[in-house]
Amino acid sequence: MKASAFCLVLCTIVAVSVTFAPAQPASAAETPSSAQSQTAQQPQQLKVTEYSLPPEKLAKAEALYQTRTVLYLFGMVFGIVVLWVLLKLRVAPVFRDLAERAGKNSFVQALVFVPLLTILIAVISLPIDIYEQHISRAYGLSVQGWGSWAGDWCKAEGVSLVITVLAVFGLFRIIRKSPQRWWFYFWLLTLPFLVLLIFVAPVILDPMFNKFEPLEKTQPLLVGEIEKVTHRGGLEIPRDRMFEMEASEKVTTYNAYVTGLGATKRVVVWDNTSRDMTVPETLFVFGHEMGHYVLNHIYKGLAFFAAMMLLGFWLARRIVLAMLARWGQAWHIRGINDLAALPVLLLALSLLTLIAEPIGNAFSRHQEHQADLYGLEVTHGLFPHNGEVAASAFQKLGEKSYAYPTPNPMLVFWSYSHPSIPDRIRFSLRYDPWHTPAGPKYVK
Ligand SMILES: [Zn+2]
């Protein structure tokens, strides 16, 4: 969890790229080699009737669940406390004075001010990031070395910095031109950039962190099977829009996702997924992703996020004005048009993000449930007992990531981007619209 709303724009990409597994920092298991041998020893598992873990894995899942819950709650308040302390210590006015000494040009000022503040906050939050990676490694969820991890951290901060400098420069220009309506004009300005960012993410940002190969090259047989699924759904996803990500270099967990917009829209399957799951299970995972693709979840996610942002900016302006009226002088901030007011705005946005989290997650869980439903429908009849196959895929997913079987419902409501694994298994085993008058919902 990053300390502030700096990653707001980057988080957007995460928010609107739709995955199979919860995109938690980790999920996990043993080393890849032992996982492989286990799969080899047990090609035919027992039929899954509900989500369950063997005692040893359950103990680990419980420990991981507790650690993650504490980290989550801690992270929730940490970013807000950091910003509050920085304001009390009047750090931003010092950076602003330095920026103003560097030049009169407002872009130059943003170029000095933003990196100082961003890097300071990133460094303060670094121990949390390191601890999260440590946990992932300790549970075998991550196999990424610290050097590679540090490289990724720097790259992510670098990308975030470039975007933040441009955003802050634009924001303060707009605030100075229109102190009343800046929240609306800034929102308007962010929309095309948001679309651009989602458009370029799979071709520019993602390859900075992972290697991608056309699925046709790495898994030609699987592509043939996948095409049976796409035909069944009455949709052609061109072969050049299917990719495999070399996730096994860094993690041991399973996932697949849909990303991009227009010409860059694509389905990506992690290599771990297709390596450890059976072909029918992988096809169900693909069917789930195809659901996101067909049901236009990226566009709908973008529209939902944009609406939340509009409301958020409007509220943020009110919160910032109220805070400045009360503490502005004590914090040495001249007004809302002062660069030093940026942490106040970030604080307001952090508070709003906190409140918006259950709303965003409820929206996400709804989309994920639709994708599960679509996946079940589009694979129906392609192989026998596809509900059981889906349940088995979820069992593997949960086992691999040590998903806790009985999470607190409040925590699920607040923080889960996907329905819980037990719920997804129950639904997969129960869903049978083919014997009802209404019939299937999406794939007739
Ligand atoms: Zn999904």
Image (cartoon, rainbow, N blue to C red):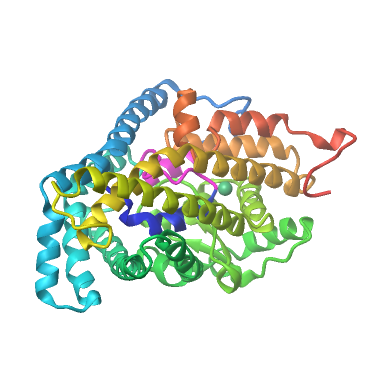
Residue 193 shown left or right of residue 428 in the figure: left
Q: Residue furthest right?
A: 437
The answer to whether residue 53 is seen in the rendering is: no
Q: Nearer the viewer, residue 348 or 250?
A: 348
- What residue appears at the point 81 percent right and 42 percent down from the top-left corner? 440
Q: Position of residue 90 (x, y in %)?
A: 11, 51
| Residue 413 as seen in the image, left or right of residue 111 | right
Quarter of the image for the N terminus: give it.
top left
Residue drawn at x 15%, y 47% is 86
Q: How would you classify the magenta stretch by its main secondary structure?
A: loop
Residue 8 appears in the figure: yes
Would residue 346 be counted in the magenta stretch? no
Stretch of the chain drawn in magenta: 20-39
Which is more toward the observer, 158 or 34? 158
Q: Is residue 396 above or below residue 216?
A: above
Q: Nearer the viewer, residue 187 or 192?
A: 187
Image coordinates of residue 369 in percent, x first then y, are 63, 40
Count how many numbered circles sit on residues in the image: 0
Is residue 29 found inside the magenta-colored segment of the image?
A: yes
